[in-house]
Image: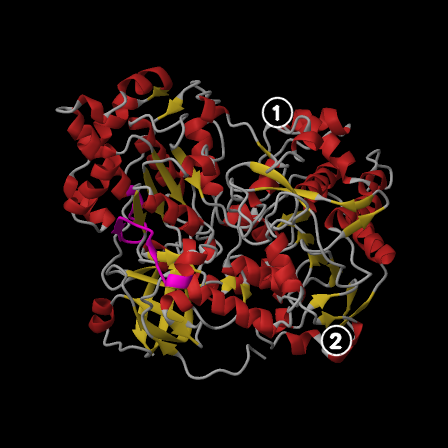
């Protein structure tokens, strides 16, 4: 079973503005399809509002600082409507369909069945999920965890949708059990950003906020498909262009967001079909060539400084940094020929970007997974910081590093304790605030957790949200690892692949969605989330839960914890009666959350303090540190291509809304590969020809996808792209960065041949 019946695959290049009437039509069709005639418009008016609204469960872009009444986007509305569907998946559904049968359904069809309504347990004898009470479900989890001979035989995964309060209780449960096995989706997306920023600046986060975006002179947007992944960024880009800021997009593909837009809540522009440019310069480096480009920009600035002393902020460098002379020498020793070869750009193009940077008084560099999902992702982010330090673009308004996080609370997850490598300082505060003795040894991240499951060392896997089976790399390997577990537990709102790829025993525990009211003994509860710019604010659901049998995520965590830790001194049930009590404990345990309950109720919430923003650097030197990494060789070997996986526009993470990708001109097709036209001609491949794609892993093993259709696209020679999660099979479990331990989803070595 798949999406609604459609016609044959089609491709026609997209030349229209991003958002605008295309987005409005898409949203209208989606609302009609889901039957959300009342709830849909209600949600639109309540989403991302500071007073009694709920936070969009989609991306982590900050809420508008000007109190915009329609701070929404196409994909956010789709995400919310998908959650508010009237369709239900209850015991009758599971009685009618075995796991074996459901395993043959498409991922679209699984989620399209609707909301899960009650806890279910897998019955191996019948190959069906059958109902189980919450009490018995918690006891099954608790008993299995209690019987482990080592708490490190369990792993606790977190998706970015989990709110801060549930996140804090979840990590508290794991650490009270005795493990730091807390893999999360950050391990697959922005781990490189956190490690790089920590090393360079002493903070694992960006230092800018949305107000900085509103006043900066130059924006450099790297490896980001904003129109699909953070659509509300389009408003900031359009505003920046109108006030004369320079906007440089750096991406192997020129995406729709890098051209022009009509922001739907700009009603006059919508009525007049008036678009606004969202870029002043587009550069297309080869996949993995970003670091060479940034090195070239730094080299150009340093060369200019010999004749133009104002090219560098020497006072800032002398007062606040260390390692400058070594970095200047490195740039001087890097030949322009090597910069051109590795970046895939001509010297003139690099100098254009450098000129924009030199002429801007204040610059922001923003990036996403196109920068991080590489072997050298940490080095690239550190190179970005190097460039910012040269002109003192840190610690002042309108300047600094700005990573674009993906899921709505993925940054909050890390802030609130989901970290397999916790700092001693964090553990000390947690121990004091919660009266536990947390383990000190580092735990497992995503890749190492999969490997440990495959070896039989981890036998219990609990996932709070997400679709781990599809999100992780090396799909067959991950499937085998999950199936080897004694127990897998999935806390979810909808049916997905991870419910069908399960351990010998398996539970599906259905939870409330972000849009739904959370009733507890103390009344309707709110939860908090942190956006990608460190703002923390409250979210309150608006509608009746999809089923009376759903529990909130904090309540599910507390239920598992009480069953697994019968002698615990942690007041789990007391916490769930009133989430303010959780926040009071968080205010004692988490740096920056002091006076949490009062501050989170302020208009727009509060911003977590960032020492580096105040030019306080928690690095070994006490200064911002220049790095001196060599340029990696990212030029593909003859006959091979560098392939990066990505999302389509009609997709959110592993959730597929349709087989269309409007902004790339694709209809009725997901099993495709975007190729440079010269690379296609060289291989004798024509448009929509079926091709075979074979990846070669670091260990020499190969993986192949057969019969994908070739799409000619404006992408540099030697590069290719296609959709995750289908292409995750091409990324071997051992193909992860030695710098960040992230799977290198954006830099796979492949050959493409006509089928």
Q: Which residues are magenta?
A: 271-291
Residue denoted by label 1: 425
Q: Position of residue 68 (x, y in %)?
A: 53, 47
Q: Residues within 10 Å of mark 2 (few under 14, many from 20)?
A: some
Name which residue lies at 67% across and 24% down: 428
Of residues 272 and 201, the one drawn nearer to the viewer in this rendering: 272
Q: Position of residue 311 (x, y in %)?
A: 21, 27
Compared with residue 665, is residue 324 higher up or lower down, i.e. above or below? above
In the rendered image, residue 223 lying in the magenta stretch gets the answer no
Front disc: 2 or 1:
2
Q: Residues within 10 Å of mark 1 (few under 14, many from 20)?
A: few
Image colouring: secondary structure
Compared with residue 254, is residue 379 higher up or lower down, i.e. above or below? above
Q: Position of residue 319 (x, y in %)?
A: 35, 15
**Sequence-wise, which precedes: disc 2 or disc 1?**
2
Residue denoted by label 2: 93
Left or right, 43 with reference to 193: right
Quarter of the image for residue 350 reads top left
Quarter of the image for residue 392 reads top left
Dot 1: what SS?
Answer: helix
Compared with residue 434, is residue 579 higher up or lower down, i.e. above or below? below
Name which residue lies at 41% across and 51% down: 234
Left or right, 60 with reference to 389: right
Left or right, 176 with reference to 368: right
Residue 371 in view here: no
Q: CA distance from mark 2 to mark 1?
A: 49 Å
């Amino acid at each position: 079973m798949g999406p609604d019946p459609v016609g044959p695959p089609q491709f026609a290049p997209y030349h229209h503005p991003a958002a605008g009437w295309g987005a409005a039509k898409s949203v209208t069709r989606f609302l009609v399809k889901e039957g959300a005639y009342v709830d849909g418009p209600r949600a639109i008016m309540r989403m991302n509002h500071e007073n009694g609204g709920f936070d969009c469960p989609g991306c982590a872009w900050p809420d508008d600082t000007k109190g915009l009444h329609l701070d929404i986007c196409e994909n956010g509305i789709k995400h919310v409507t998908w959650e508010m569907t009237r369709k239900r998946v209850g015991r009758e559904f599971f009685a009618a369909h075995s796991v074996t049968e459901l395993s043959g359904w498409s991922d679209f069809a699984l989620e399209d069945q609707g909301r899960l309504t009650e806890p279910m347990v897998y019955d191996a004898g019948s190959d069906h999920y059958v109902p189980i009470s919450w009490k018995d479900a918690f006891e099954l989890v608790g008993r299995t965890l209690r019987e482990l001979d080592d708490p490190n035989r369990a792993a606790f995964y977190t998706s970015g949708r989990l709110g801060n309060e549930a996140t804090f209780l979840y990590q508290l449960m794991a650490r009270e059990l005795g493990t730091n096995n807390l893999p999360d989706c950050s391990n697959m997306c922005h781990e490189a950003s956190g490690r790089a920023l920590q090393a360079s600046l002493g903070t694992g986060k960006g230092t800018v906020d949305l107000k900085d975006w509103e006043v900066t002179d130059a924006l450099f947007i790297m490896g980001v498909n904003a129109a699909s992944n953070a659509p509300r960024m389009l408003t900031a880009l359009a505003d920046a262009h109108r006030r004369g800021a320079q906007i440089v997009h750096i991406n192997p593909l020129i995406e729709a967001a890098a051209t022009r837009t009509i922001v739907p809540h700009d009603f006059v522009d919508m009525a007049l079909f008036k678009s606004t440019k969202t870029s002043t310069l587009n550069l297309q480096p080869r996949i993995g060539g970003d670091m060479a480009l940034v090195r070239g920009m730094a080299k150009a600035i340093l060369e200019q400084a010999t004749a133009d002393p104002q090219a560098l902020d020497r006072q800032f460098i002398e007062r606040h940094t260390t390692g400058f002379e070594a970095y200047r020498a490195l740039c001087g020793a890097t030949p322009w020929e090597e910069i051109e070869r590795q970046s895939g750009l001509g010297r003139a193009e690099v100098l254009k970007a450098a000129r924009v940077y030199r002429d801007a008084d204040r610059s922001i560099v923003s990036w996403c997974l196109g920068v991080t999902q590489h072997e050298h992702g940490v080095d690239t982010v550190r190179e970005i910081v190097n460039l910012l330090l040269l002109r003192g673009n840190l610690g002042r308004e309108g300047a600094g590093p700005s990573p674009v996080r993906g899921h709505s609370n993925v940054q909050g997850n890390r802030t609130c304790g989901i970290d397999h490598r916790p700092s001693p300082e964090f553990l000390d505060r947690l121990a004091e605030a919660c009266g536990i003795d947390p383990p000190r040894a580092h735990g497992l991240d995503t890749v190492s957790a999969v490997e440990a499951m495959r070896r039989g060392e981890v036998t219990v896997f609990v996932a709070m949200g997400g679709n781990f089976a599809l999100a992780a790399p090396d799909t067959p390997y991950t499937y085998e690892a999950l199936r080897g577990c004694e127990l897998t537990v999935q806390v979810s709102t909808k049916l997905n692949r991870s419910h069908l790829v399960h351990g010998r025993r398996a539970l599906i525990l259905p939870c409330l969605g972000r849009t739904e009211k959370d009733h507890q003994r103390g009344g309707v509860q709110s939860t908090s989330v942190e956006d990608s710019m460190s703002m923390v604010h409250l979210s309150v659901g608006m509608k009746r839960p999809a089923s009376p049998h759903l529990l909130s995520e904090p309540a599910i965590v507390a239920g598992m914890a009480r069953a697994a830790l019968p002698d615990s001194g942690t007041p789990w049930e007391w916490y769930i009666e009133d989430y303010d009590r959780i926040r009071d404990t968080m205010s004692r345990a988490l740096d920056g959350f002091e006076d949490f309950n009062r501050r989170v109720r302020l208009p727009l919430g509060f911003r977590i303090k960032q020492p580096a923003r105040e030019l306080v650097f928690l690095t070994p030197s006490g200064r911002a540190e220049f790095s001196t990494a060599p340029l990696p060789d990212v030029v593909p070997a003859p006959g091979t291509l560098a392939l990066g996986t990505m999302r389509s526009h009609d997709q959110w993470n592993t959730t597929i809304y349709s087989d269309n990708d409007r902004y790339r001109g694709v209809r009725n097709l997901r099993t495709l590969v975007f190729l440079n036209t010269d690379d296609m001609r060289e291989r004798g491949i024509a448009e929509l020809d079926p091709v075979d794609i074979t990846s070669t892993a670091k260990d020499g093993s190969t993986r192949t996808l057969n019969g994908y259709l070739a799409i000619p696209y404006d992408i540099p020679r030697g590069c290719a792209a296609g959709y995750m999660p289908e292409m995750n099979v091409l990324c071997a479990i051992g193909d992860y960065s030695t710098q960040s331990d992230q799977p290198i989803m954006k830099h796979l070595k492949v050959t493409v041949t006509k089928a």
